[in-house]
Image (cartoon, helix red, strand yellow):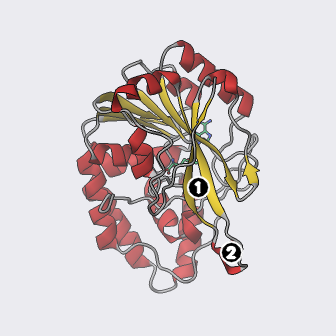
């Protein structure tokens, strides 16, 4: 999926996996709900293919959810603000970054957040125990050029404006709004590093609460997809979701570890994707052969595990 706009650099973004994840999205869904939207890579990809009529984008990280809303609803102003702040950095780029960071921590202005995400190390957000953004600047780059940023912002706005609702609530509140004609895509914070506090994201979630929320969705016949655990070589990270949820689990090849390749080891990272039974029922007519491996960059299906 080339030329899909992405204004927000965000570690853990699903933009590279989106083409594979979209294979499990039925055609003509009423609304796509992303309770853990991050950079909203899946909503953007679904909108680019005009698969859903409307979108609900939510992230507990308030400046992030507000930033997405500004990009979609006020693209001209948001792009101009970025251009101005980007141009300011040239006298002393690092000092400028630290000043913007402290202004952001004081004001929580989402427009400052856009610059920090574009300018910080690998777009990877980091928070201290007081919830202050404390990621360092990338010393080798100056952040996305304003012209490129403007193109990306306008692109996302064109795709989502007029059909998207934004919120910044806990995912459980968002799930109460889901209807059987919607599709919910969930990409919660990584396990193993999160627990209650995850310095990599704004907040973490509890595994057991998440399972209860999925049980509840099952009882309401909601179609959903979850990106959850994964593995690299033989090492798994994160707990699997339990069989009792009746989900279909697929492993997606998410990339090769460059460190391991250097050391002569062939270590591929796989991420699990779980499909709810309401969704697999809808997909039945698509006759997806989950077992058919289709090797290509970023995608290779492992044999599917059907959970009873
Ligand atoms: C793995 S990231 C999602 C990345 C996203 N799929 C993308 O493509 O950019 C998980 C997100 O969940 C958010 N989050 C953490 N706890 C949450 C909660 N309880 N409710 C809603 N969102 C939450 C984090 O702020 C983070 O942006």
Q: CA distance from mark 2 to mark 1?
A: 38 Å
At mark 1, the secondary structure is helix
Q: Residue drawn at (54%, 83%), measured in percent from left and top?
A: 140
Q: Residue drawn at (53%, 67%), measured in percent from left and top?
A: 100
Q: Position of residue 305 (x, y in %)?
A: 61, 36
Q: Position of residue 256 (x, y in %)?
A: 60, 66
Of 193 and 119, the residue lying toward us:
193
Image quarter in which the N terminus is found: bottom left
Q: Position of residue 98 (x, y in %)?
A: 59, 72
Of 173 and 131, the residue lying toward us:
173
Point out which mark residue 259 bears. Answer: 2
The correct choice, above or below, for 283 with respect to 259 in the image is: above
Of 75 and 270, the residue lying toward us:
270
Q: For the residue carrying disc 1, how many other residues have a C-alpha within 10 Å: few (<14), some (14-19), or many (20+)?
A: few
Q: For the residue carrying disc 2, how many other residues have a C-alpha within 10 Å: few (<14), some (14-19), or many (20+)?
A: few
Of 279 and 55, the residue lying toward us:
279
Point out which mark residue 95 bears. Answer: none
Which quadrant holds residue 137?
Answer: bottom right
Which quadrant holds residue 88?
Answer: bottom left
Q: Residue drawn at (68%, 26%), measured in percent from left and top?
A: 243
Q: Position of residue 91 (x, y in %)?
A: 47, 86
At mark 2, the secondary structure is helix
The correct choice, above or below, for 65 with respect to 266 in the image is: above
The answer to whether the residue bearing label 2 lies less than 8 angstroms from the nearest atom of ligand 1 is no
Left or right of 284 in this view: 11:
right
Please state the quadrant of the image where ligand 1 appears.
top right
Point out which mark residue 106 bears. Answer: 1
């Amino acid at each position: 999926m080339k030329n899909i706009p992405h204004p927000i650099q965000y570690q853990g973004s699903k933009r590279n996996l989106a083409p594979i994840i979209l294979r499990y999205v039925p055609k003509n869904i009423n609304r796509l709900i992303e309770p853990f939207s991050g950079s909203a890579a899946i909503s953007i990809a679904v909108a680019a293919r005009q698969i859903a009529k409307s979108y609900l984008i939510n992230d507990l990280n308030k400046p992030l959810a507000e930033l997405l809303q500004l990009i979609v609803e006020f693209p001209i102003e948001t792009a101009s603000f970025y251009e101005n702040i980007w141009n300011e950095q040239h006298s002393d780029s690092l000092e400028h970054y630290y000043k913007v960071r402290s202004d952001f921590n004081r004001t929580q202005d989402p427009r400052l957040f856009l610059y920090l995400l574009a300018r910080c190390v690998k777009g990877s957000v980091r928070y201290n125990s007081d919830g202050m953004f404390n990621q360092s600047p990338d010393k080798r780059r100056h952040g996305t050029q304003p012209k490129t940023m403007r193109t990306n912002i306008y692109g996302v706005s064109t795709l989502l404006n007029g059909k998207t609702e934004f919120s910044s609530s806990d995912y459980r509140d968002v799930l109460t709004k889901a209807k059987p004609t919607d599709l919910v895509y969930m990409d919660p914070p990584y396990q193993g590093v999160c627990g209650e506090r995850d310095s990599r994201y704004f907040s973490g979630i509890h595994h057991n609460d998440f399972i209860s929320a999925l049980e509840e969705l099952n009882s309401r016949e909601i179609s959903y997809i979850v990106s959850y655990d994964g593995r690299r070589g033989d090492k798994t990270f994160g707990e699997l979701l339990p069989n009792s949820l009746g989900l279909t689990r697929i492993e997606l090849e998410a990339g090769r570890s460059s460190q391991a390749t250097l050391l002569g080891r062939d270590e591929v990272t796989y991420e699990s994707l779980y499909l709810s039974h309401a969704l697999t029922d809808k997909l039945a007519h698509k006759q997806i052969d989950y077992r058919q491996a289709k090797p290509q960059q970023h995608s290779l299906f492992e044999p599917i595990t059907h959970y009873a």
